[in-house]
Amino acid sequence: MANFRMHILICGGTGCMSSHSPEVHKNFIDILGKKGLSKEIQVLKTGCFGFCEQGPIVKIYPDNIFYVGVTGQDVEEIINEHVIKGRPVQRLLYVDPMKKSPQEEHKDIAFYQSQVRIALKNCGLIDPENIDDYISVRGYEALGECITSKTPEEIIKIIKDSGLRGRGGAGFPTGLKWEFAQKSASDKKYVICNADEGDPGAFMDRSILEGDPHAVLEAMAICGYAIGADEGVIYIRAEYPLAVKRLQVAIAQAEELGLLGDSILGTGFNFKITLSLGAGAFVCGEETALLNSVEGGRGEPRVRPPFPAVKGLYQKPTNINNVETYANITQIILNGPEWFNSIGTETSKGTKVFALAGKINNVGLVEVPMGTSIRDIIYKIGGGIRGGKKFKAIQTGGPSGGCIPAELMDLKIDYETLNAAGSMMGSGGMIVMDEDDCMVNIAKFYLEFTLEESCGKCTPCRIGTTRIYEILERITKGQGKMEDLDALKELGEVIRDASLCSLGQTAPNPVLSTIDYFYDEYLAHIQDKKCPAKACTDLLEYVVIDEKCIGCTLCARNCPVSCISGAVKKPHHIDQSKCIKCGVCESKCPVKAIIKQ
């Protein structure tokens, strides 16, 4: 590293790669080679920088210049102007909409200023496919310290004292979970990483594995030493090919250096890690369904107790944490539990990674201290609502979470606060909604998802979610009745109390929370047969405003069902009995004379 005068870091996460960052990487390599600069300029393909809305991203060290929206055609200009002449390319710098000026360094960009990176510390900084890069940022130092100078009990105490809670959804104390597995007597134990990230709009765990896979491997090995396990399994979706590839590369590299496998660092501690590829079933994110899947069985939850810490994989004591939980472990060991404990709130320590998506200007991956408000995430980091629209609600916790309305945007993000508001932390998905979103329709969307993903093992979930979906379907079609609201609440409570696993227990949350916070919208659908957000197709009408219509006939000529009539230069009319509400007429009207109501 010291032989290079400059380093060019190019985002190699899935998002930027889909936006042609491999072409950017290749062009840098090729053009630097042609100019004879390859020996003094290093080009690195990193993990996700988090600022996905602005990708592909290129960062140049030691200048700390941060380029956004870079294409393959921009590379030669960057090399000629910046690399050779030392003049940043102004047109490729991020322009903050508030400051109205280009921001050269990422620390000056509002998106990053409120973030504290622990789990994402190395993402965007190192080459995830080069173990030397990871070692250069103190990689495997924590593992070496643990297995050479700490007892399992000391390690577990550090994790307990840190206050780290599981980042997969339930928020169970991680140190306590490790302690249960350690105290379970057995001739064989396992460590499992749950990388089955299935929430709509969630990409936190995938990005960590793509950008910093060794951090998870190292943490799993530390956990193995702490609980007395010699084998780890990463359960990951086969539909995450880049993360799978980088894990395979990382495991092979760690084994080659003796950091995984037999007698790690000559200590006699053995630990190997294998991958188990899932087929994309959301229910397999539930830990006991995951165990069945790893064993080759159906992805159905088991009755608990016994819990996995007592009887897990192949009926042996097993510790299961998700990717983000493990990604915090090495930093806690290196920096001490007091350091981690000092971040966050009284009951929710550290930071949380969120996938910020939906109607937000800065779609991306963010990591903030626990206790950060929803307002700060949406407006300071997220840059506000897209198109200047009005913020309406935010869905946290994925299909298992709830919808929090705009009037509660000053809520502090932690486990207890979100639960009290009718939502949950979940794995970290955050879907932002604006004034054009119908909350009844949103509830139906999430119910349809959980209905499709239910394993069908228990009756409350299998039948209950079906009945709820059918009621919501009727309401969004204008066929709802007032008694449907009581039925939704009653069904939701029964499903929550009687389902076997957390998928069913939390499935009613989107419905119950939207009824609580957006009751008027349900009333409008049922009593007025109208959708206030104009999102439910069956309750819409496209109408022509006579005084605006110029009679250009574009609407009539483009209507797929010929339901629009009218003479040239005369106001047109839409036959509502024939209209299929496709919206083509509205999109084609040059004077905006057609509106939906």
Image: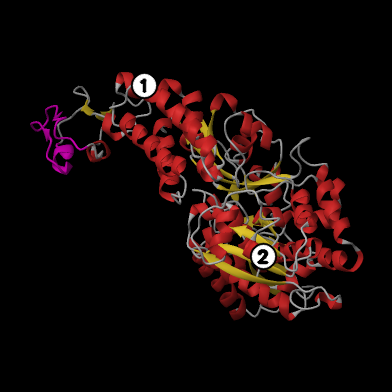
Q: Are marks 1 and 2 in contact (CB under 8 Å)?
A: no
> Which residue appears at 59% of the width and 75% of the height?
29
Boundaries of the magenta span: 553-580
Furthest residue in direction left, as rendered = 567
Rendering colour mode:
secondary structure
Q: Main secondary structure of the magenta part?
A: loop
> Which residue appears at 79% of the width and 53% of the height?
179
Describe residue 407's horizontal placement relative to residue 250 as left or right: left
Describe residue 332's horizontal placement relative to residue 84 as left or right: right
Give the image location of residue 138, x and y in percent. Answer: 81, 65
For badge 1, the amino acid type reads Glu
Give the image location of residue 500, x and y in percent. Answer: 53, 45
Work out whether 581 lies above or below 597.
below
Describe residue 293's horizontal placement relative to residue 46 as left or right: left
Describe residue 479's horizontal placement relative to residue 570 as left or right: right
User: Mark 2 highlights which residue?
Assistant: 213
Give the image location of residue 69, x and y in percent. Answer: 53, 56
Spatial CA span between label 1 and label 2: 52 Å
Going from the N terminus, do you reach mark 1 or mark 2 first?
Answer: 2
Quarter placement of the N terminus: bottom right
Query: Residue 98 lies in what quarter of the image?
Result: top right
Q: Is residue 389 visible?
A: no
Quarter placement of the C terminus: top left
Furthest residue in direction right, as rendered = 149
Q: Which mark is residue 483?
A: 1
**Is 560 contained in the magenta span?**
yes
Q: Residues within 10 Å of mark 1 (few under 14, many from 20)?
A: few
For badge 2, the amino acid type reads Pro
What element does badge 2 sit on? Answer: helix
What element does badge 1 sit on? Answer: helix
Q: Is residue 157 visible?
A: yes
**494 or 516, nearer to the observer:** 494
